[in-house]
Image (cartoon, rainbow, N blue to C red):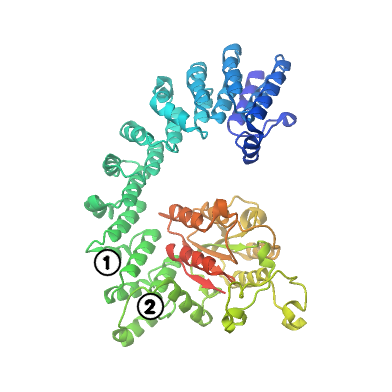
Amino acid sequence: MKIRALNLALALLLAGGVFPFAVFAVPQADDDKDKGAGKKLGVASVEKRSKLLQDRWKGLRSGPIERRILLIQEFANAPCKETVDFLIRLYGSEKNSGIHMSITQTLGKIGTEPAIRAVIGKGLPLLENNAFNITAVAQALENPMESKAEQWLLKSGLRAASLRRNEVVWNRVVAAVADFKNPQRVSFLTREMMTNKSPKTLVVILNSLENVKDKKVVSIAGKLVKHKDPGVQVAAMSLLYNQGGSREKKLFEKGLKNRAWQVRLLSLRTLARLKHKKISDYAIAALNDPDDKVQVNAVRILLDQGGREIILPLIRHIDKARGRVKDDVIDALTRLTGKDLGPSTFQWEGWWEQKGKTVKVVARCSAEEFTKMKQKLAEETNTVAYHGLRVLSDNFIFIFDSSESMKEQYVPPEERPENRGKAGGDAGRTVVVDPNDPNAGGRGQKEALQSKLAVAQKNLKKVLNGLKVGKRFDIIMFESIITDFIRAKLEKEPDKLAVLDLESRGKALAFVDQARPQGQTYMLKALETAFENDEVDTIYLLSDGAPTPPEKAGMNVILERMRKLNRVRSVKINTIGFDLKDKEKEFLRTLADEHFGVFVER
């Protein structure tokens, strides 16, 4: 029973779980706070901490094994030569495999070259004969490490035969190497692509190398497009797409008929990027693809292509299309023609037959022009709309800002100083006021302006009340904390969207009502949370300013992250901005335009 309990405790420890012995719990070495504290302490203080921990170890020589394991973990907070030397000595003096696993894990967190050498030279021989124990070696090598440690591993450490003999451990190690900064990783991973049989590992390698300009890498990826595993095919095609794909034109033409929708999608996009002479024909044919994601990419390509010959195929696809695809087709037609005739093939065909010949230019207007067009047409739509944006999708998520700044007054655009002829910097920015003050902003009680949050809540509740039963949805409220409706009110994991019915509608309305303005604008985390749901195809993001904290998730960081997350997913991201500065406005407009969406300023 003791052995079984110890193994359970170790499993929790290796998985980053919590021991049942909470009184002995210590902060993990990789915690941001501990890292900062370590830098401030200096070498002498770290060595002093190491000495104190070694003294505590002497007093625990005959103590419970669980306490000793936890104490070894504390040495990760004292990363110095004395600590590494002490842990290496423990390898020789201790006989318990649980202790050996804990030493290995802690050395991996320290991540210096001597520590990593000890993991391979001392820890691996002690743990290699047990499939469970050797996972500690894999975990040790998955930690960030010093450049010298990476260099040694690539040159010598990874040659250890026992590492490769355990397939699970080896694949974890290869995945860890994929995150290395050392340029020699490319040679190692290239060789691994030719020999590794694990589809999951091949995907990790291909994703890691997608930005590496190397002819051999591209050549191997071209062969892996024919791999029997769809995931490997997609990763290989994604690498070729990212590299430009100019030499593999025939491969992409063939990819249009691949059974995997991801391959068809990336093939279509690459041929568009290469300006293939038949791209309009390919995109029109792809409007009838069985997968909606391929269809929306076909619509986007036709929008980019422009030309009179694409209008009728788009119009005739309106009645065939569903939800999100229908929304994209109408947006494309509006952006090409300057007209918004709604989701009706009949109206569009009639207009095109009578007036189409008078339309001189059939080309995609700019994102800024499209924004103005949508704002002008916002009040004319008969469809359920959120700030003028039709809600035609059947699978959507509303993300709205509830940060501290949302307690500011909401001033309608037409009443803002800059729109009354006043100029200068922040003239259009509102100030923080008490939204409950009846005289806020110098108005009488009946005319008091509402807070931005109150306006956001009112509009979202109006949409929720207008949507038909059966739609699938979620709501994410973000400030310093991300609050998800499905988890908070339905008490489910938000891996699937909620079905709109009388009960969920009522709970959603209550969820929106509970929002209070506080905290910072953690926009990236909110978007990443939305992308954890595989069912969503449309996002409505509302915010009144720049994301924070800028050093971790600034505007450029978010744009780059979304490009990667949404490369294949093709989620439509509509953005709504409240009283924005120019840079914030451009950011939300770019975010929408790059991801099939529309930006509206309110």
Residue 167 in view (yes/no): no
Going by the numbered disc 2, the residue's amino acid type is Thr
Q: Nearer the viewer, residue 328 or 586?
A: 586
Going by the numbered disc 1, the residue's amino acid type is Ser
Whole-number angstrom distance, CA of label 1 to CA of label 2: 21 Å
Q: Position of residue 520 (x, y in %)?
A: 65, 57
Residue 433 in view (yes/no): yes
According to the image, label 1 marks what residue? 280
User: Quick check: 566 left or right of 39?
Assistant: left
According to the image, label 2 marks what residue? 345
107 is higher (above) or lower (below) than 320: above
Give the secondary structure at mark 1: helix
Label 2: how many Cα within 10 Å (few below 14, some 14–19, many 20+): some
Q: Quadrant location of residue 549? A: bottom right
Q: Nearer the viewer, residue 544 or 500?
A: 544
- Give the total number of marks visible in the rendering: 2
Q: Residue at x 45, y 31 (%)?
A: 150
Q: Position of residue 45 (x, y in %)?
A: 67, 29
377 is higher (above) or lower (below) than 155: below
Q: Nearer the viewer, residue 45 or 346?
A: 45
Q: Position of residue 257 (x, y in %)?
A: 27, 54
Q: Residue at x 63, y 57 (%)?
A: 485
Q: Which mark is residue 160?
A: none
